[in-house]
Amino acid sequence: MNKNRISPFNSSLESGVRALSILTTIYPKTADLQRLVEFDYLVVHSGDANGPESLHAPLPMRAGELLVRRGVIEAGLILMMSRALVIRIPTEHGIEFMAGENASAFVNSFNTPYLKKLIERSQWVASEYGEATEEEVRSVTRQFFDKWTTQFHAIKGSLGDSYE
């Protein structure tokens, strides 16, 4: 196996395209990195939030992805900014991101089944959570994280070891 091979899964390209799809859907609104992390989780695992079938398979303990998703999405945003598809905007609340001038044309050129589902899930997230406050969105994703930490404690306890 070639260790230098780059996987398209969980890459900056994949996460950048997902973030771009979200930003295009909510345009002209902006989103900060934390909201994009939470929206990205909801796009990928929409079935967990009583939405359409999840974009990715429901892997066990997937809520742990919330811990590592931020860096991958940030790298994806940087990639999309380098192609002028995403614009970084300084605001009084911090850095926010907005779809660039060519983002819509780029996203609308997607024609594979996966990318069409991505757009549908992004539209669902925008419809369900686009007007939600930061705390409202966080409470939804926190439920998944709390469930994951509970699962983690159950595994830790089953090993018979105490790490406290």
Image: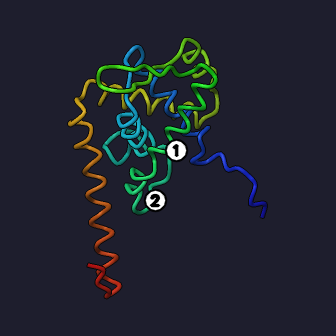
Residue 100 versus residue 156 in the image, above or below: above
Mark seen at residue 59: 2
- Disc on the earlier residue, 1 or 2: 2
Q: Position of residue 118 (x, y in %)?
A: 51, 34
Q: Position of residue 108 (x, y in %)?
A: 58, 19
Identify residue type, mark 2.
Answer: Leu
Q: Residue at x 30, y 53 (%)?
A: 144
SS of the residue under disc 1: helix
Residue 91 versus residue 147 in the image, above or below: above
Side (left or right) of 68 relative to 6: left
Side (left or right) of 154 relative to 110: left
Question: Which sits in the foreground, 138 or 116?
Answer: 138
Question: Which sits in the foreground, 163 or 19?
Answer: 163
Q: Residue at x 49, y 53 (%)?
A: 57
Identify residue type, mark 1.
Answer: Val
Quadrant of res 148: bottom left
Q: Residue at x 39, y 62 (%)?
A: 61
Local crowd size for mark 2, using a 10 Å CA cut-off: few (<14), some (14–19), many (≥20): few
Q: Which residue is mark 1?
A: 72
Q: How is the image coloured?
A: rainbow
Mark seen at residue 10: none
Quarter of the image with the N terminus in it: bottom right
Distance from the alpha carbon under mark 1 to that under mark 2: 18 Å
Most extreme residue toward the bottom, as rendered?
160
Q: How many marks?
A: 2
Most extreme residue toward the right, as rendered?
2
Q: Position of residue 123 (x, y in %)?
A: 41, 26
Q: Residue at x 35, y 39 (%)?
A: 51
SS of the residue under disc 2: loop
Circles 1 and 2, Cβ within 8 Å, touching? The answer is no
